[in-house]
């Protein structure tokens, strides 16, 4: 499958299941409302108790003066501080759980669309897929988080080594130190960007393995790594659609700044435009996921099915079957029985 065909098919799947975009927008509004009730109200109470004027939050010296003695505040208002921290932790946990559930439902619907088992969007199917993929996605995201921590540790270690080399070179010659600093910084930036993109691509294709094949977190991670190792063009596709998504999102968001400069109605127009921009970004993000799923399904899954089907090549066309026939009975060969087949008499 070509890249353009994968993008077109991914767009068709999201257009057919446009309700997924509405679900993401609704989840965004619910997160804002939940933050106001779960975190905003306890935080406002804490500000009032600490003596902060909520109408003058721009005066940071008041905040610094209030928290100048944190031990005294903790000993005096320990219960209130604990309430604020608990509400914040509860909100973050709820947002992560709902986000994983909605993401599982979305990739499940996309996976069903690829297999042809779901032609139209159904809320029942979305909820069942979210339940099915919730715990596997929790384990998978935990593994990916560990990989990101490992990548950050490696990059930090390399950065420390570079700083040591540059410091040693600075003692010899400043020009050499400047050259080495710029050179190694560029190399580290390229390596870091490559590692981050590889980790993100493993995450995306691992989600495809989980949704299409129904594998567990560990098997999905291994399968996505094997797939990217055998199909480097899949990584190139991810880079293409990822940077395309970033570019389009940047262009869409940058238009809101001139709107905010319009007198009187500029703020209102910018607010409405931000809402529309979020809808566009949600749609593009789902198209990105569907594109990768389509490409994975047309390469890895189709090839695997072709290899498991006798007499069919990976391209889906009939091929030569292996010679598995048993010895022919008399009368079934090319020559009549009783004649020497080697001499023809």
Image: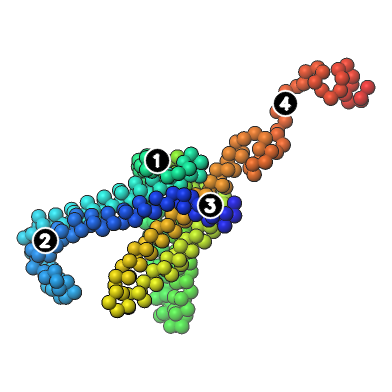
Q: CA distance from mark 1 to mark 3?
A: 21 Å
Q: Around disc 2, counting alpha carbons within 10 Å, would you say few (fewer than 14), some (14 to 19), or many (20 or more)?
A: some
Residue 156, by quadrant, is bottom left
Q: Which residue is mark 1?
A: 125
From the viewer's perspective, is 163 left or right of 68?
right
- Residue drawn 49% across the image and 54% down it: 11
Residue 301, percent from left and from top: 55, 43
Q: Which residue is mark 2?
A: 45
- The answer to which of marks 1 and 2 sits earlier in the sequence is 2
Q: Around disc 1, counting alpha carbons within 10 Å, would you say few (fewer than 14), some (14 to 19), or many (20 or more)?
A: some
Q: Nearer the viewer, mark 4 or mark 2?
A: 2
What element does badge 2 sit on? helix
- The answer to which of marks 4 and 2 sits earlier in the sequence is 2
What element does badge 3 sit on? helix
Residue 77, by quadrant, is bottom left
Q: CA distance from mark 1 to mark 2?
A: 42 Å
- Residue drawn 57% across the image and 50% down it: 230
Q: Which residue is mark 4?
A: 325
From the viewer's side, name the closer residue of 164 and 124: 124
- Residue drawn 60% across the image and 36% down it: 308
Q: CA distance from mark 3 to mark 2?
A: 51 Å
Q: Which residue is mark 3?
A: 9
Residue 291, percent from left and from top: 50, 53
Residue sitting at the far left: 76
Q: CA distance from mark 4 to mark 1?
A: 46 Å
What element does badge 4 sit on? loop
- The answer to which of marks 4 and 3 sits earlier in the sequence is 3
């Amino acid at each position: 499958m070509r890249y353009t065909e994968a993008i077109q098919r991914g767009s068709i799947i999201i257009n057919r299941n446009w309700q997924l975009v509405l679900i993401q927008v609704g989840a965004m509004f619910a997160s804002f409302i939940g933050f106001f009730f779960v975190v905003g109200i306890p935080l406002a109470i804490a500000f009032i108790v600490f003596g902060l004027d909520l109408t003058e939050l721009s005066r940071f010296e008041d905040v610094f003066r209030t928290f100048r003695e944190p031990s005294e505040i903790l000993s005096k208002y320990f219960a209130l501080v604990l309430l604020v921290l608990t509400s914040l932790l509860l909100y973050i946990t709820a947002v992560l759980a709902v986000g994983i559930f909605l993401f599982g439902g979305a990739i499940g619907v996309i996976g069903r669309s690829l297999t042809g088992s779901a032609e139209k969007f159904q809320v029942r199917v979305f909820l069942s897929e979210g339940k099915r993929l919730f715990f596997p996605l929790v384990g998978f995201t935990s593994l990916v988080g560990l990989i990101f921590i490992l990548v950050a540790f490696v990059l930090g270690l390399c950065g420390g080594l570079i700083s040591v080399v540059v410091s040693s070179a600075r003692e010899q010659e400043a020009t050499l130190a400047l050259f080495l600093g710029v050179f190694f910084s560029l190399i580290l930036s390229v390596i870091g960007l490559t590692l981050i993109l590889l980790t993100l691509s493993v995450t995306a294709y691992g989600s495809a393995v989980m949704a299409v094949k129904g594998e567990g977190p560990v098997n999905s991670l291994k399968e996505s790594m094997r797939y990217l190792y055998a199909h480097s063009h899949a990584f190139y596709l991810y880079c293409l659609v990822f940077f395309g998504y970033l570019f389009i999102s940047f262009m869409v968001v940058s238009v809101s700044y001139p709107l905010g400069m319009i007198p009187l109605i500029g703020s209102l127009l910018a607010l409405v435009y931000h809402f529309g921009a979020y809808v566009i970004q949600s749609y593009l993000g789902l198209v990105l996921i569907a594109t990768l799923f389509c490409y994975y399904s047309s390469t890895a899954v189709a090839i695997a099915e072709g290899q498991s089907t006798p007499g069919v090549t990976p391209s889906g066309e009939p091929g030569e079957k292996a010679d598995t026939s048993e010895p022919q009975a008399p009368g079934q060969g090319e020559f009549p029985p009783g004649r020497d087949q080697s001499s023809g008499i």
